Image: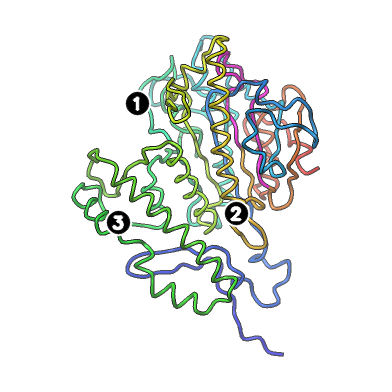
Amino acid sequence: MMIFNKAIPRRTFLRGAGATLALPLLDSMIPAFAGPAETVTKPVARIAFVYVPFGSIRNKWMPETEGAGYDLSPTLQPLAPFREHVLVLSGLDNRTSMAQPGEGGAHHTRASATYLTGVHPKATDGVDIRAGISADQQAARELGKHTQLASLELALDPPFNAGVCEPSFSCAYLNTLSWRTPTTPMPMEDKPRAVFERLFGDSETTDRAARLARIKENRSLLDDLTETVASLTGTLPASDRAKVNEYLEALRDVERRIQLAEEQSSRELPTLERPAGGYPASYEDYAKLMIDLQVLAFQTDMTRVITFMLAHELSNRSYPQIGIPDGHHGLSHHRGDPRQIAKIIKLNAYHVGIFGYYLDKFRSTRDGDGTLLDHSMIVYGSGIADGNLHTNEDLPILLAGSGIGKIKGGRHVRYPKGTPLTNLYLSMFEIAGVPVDKLGDSTGKLDHLSA
């Protein structure tokens, strides 16, 4: 018997009229008679970190029982459809964020700086900032060898102004979770258009006239690739055509929403070499748009590492869409007021619901022989346990995804008091094939993630 068909290379891009489009993993990228050892068929692990500030109301977050038979707490109820894909992890600490002699406050600054590093930041209001290499950047050093972008760092808040945001600590510590080196923080991108163009490319400017002309023209990236896409899909089997069509529809939808946000944005933008774009008026629409961009980035294997802040520490964003006109930071200092506590509980559940959207998109996006959720490890949590008391022990932490079949969800696992959060990251490194044995204050890998 003779086999003539050849596999499409995994790193295949469509190019036309100056546009470039990466493809998701298709069956046609698997060679005929490929065995399980073929690297093209082996699922790759993705790692994501989703951050929320100010902790939670513990007795409404933490399940009362451990193991597989636990009942979802009120705050975690939005994750009911994803229960079997989520581990609730208790007992993990962020003690490196504790104040050292003479430092006083700055609880939020230290929580942000230590969450992914496990290293106490240097107290300074100058440019001599120093923390540690963060977990996402440790992963990016290895996983980025195989992708066009080593990592993505995204946020739903613009950066704070330069200077001091809390006593004795630079605002630079609050603007990011990600540190490429101990002295090099990674900027977090908050503009959907900029993220889109980083993934798919565009050379237009932010000049207002040019930007409005682009919006009026309303030409899709895919319109530039119509002939190329048509010639490719004509050669694919039905299953791959369906995958490509689903992917292209998702891409068109993201483009449409970005354009709508720009149309609704009336503010002037500085003229830059790359466009900044507008923001969706609704926080929830904004979050979902940024999540969908992350799905595209993972689906096309443009990157395998993403860090995403739903809000900065010290964010005082209000949420009138759910009946909370109060600023989040101020509300977190509830001082035992039942009315404020009730609002925080509602807000915690709202953020968990947005994370539920994240998981739903990952679960519904096919990736090889499974889904993105099957092949990902997604940490959701906060660097502070209780926003009112600024405690940093027993953090609210979730781990979602199957980690290429090496993680079993549907359980509440409690670890001994004093277990560093960084131990979780070491366990994720091991699953993803990242050769790092020490991170910040880590003391070893976590047990019980797989069984």
Res. 162 mark: 1
> Is 287 or 44 nearer to us in this picture?
287
Question: Which mark is first along the chain, 1 or 2?
Answer: 1
Up/down of 133 relative to 147, above or below: above
Amino acid on which disc 3 is placed: Ser
Up/down of 148 relative to 178, above or below: below
> Is 149 or 29 nearer to us in this picture?
29
**In the image, 53: left or right of 159?**
right
Label 2 to label 3, Cα distance in Å? 32 Å
Q: Residues within 10 Å of mark 1 (few under 14, many from 20)?
A: few
Find numbered disc 2 in the image and state the secondary structure of the residue it sits on.
loop
Find numbered disc 1 in the image and state the secondary structure of the residue it sits on.
loop
Q: Foreground mark, 2 or 3? A: 2
Please name the residue that numbered disc 3 is placed on: 203
Residues shaded magenta = 380-401
As drawn, which residue projects farthest toward the left?
Answer: 209
**In the image, 36: left or right of 185?**
right
Q: Residues within 10 Å of mark 3 (few under 14, many from 20)?
A: few
Question: Which mark is first along the chain, 3 or 2?
Answer: 3
Amino acid on which disc 2 is placed: Ser
Please name the residue that numbered disc 2 is placed on: 364
> Is 290 or 304 nearer to us in this picture?
290
As drawn, which residue projects farthest toward the bottom?
Answer: 1
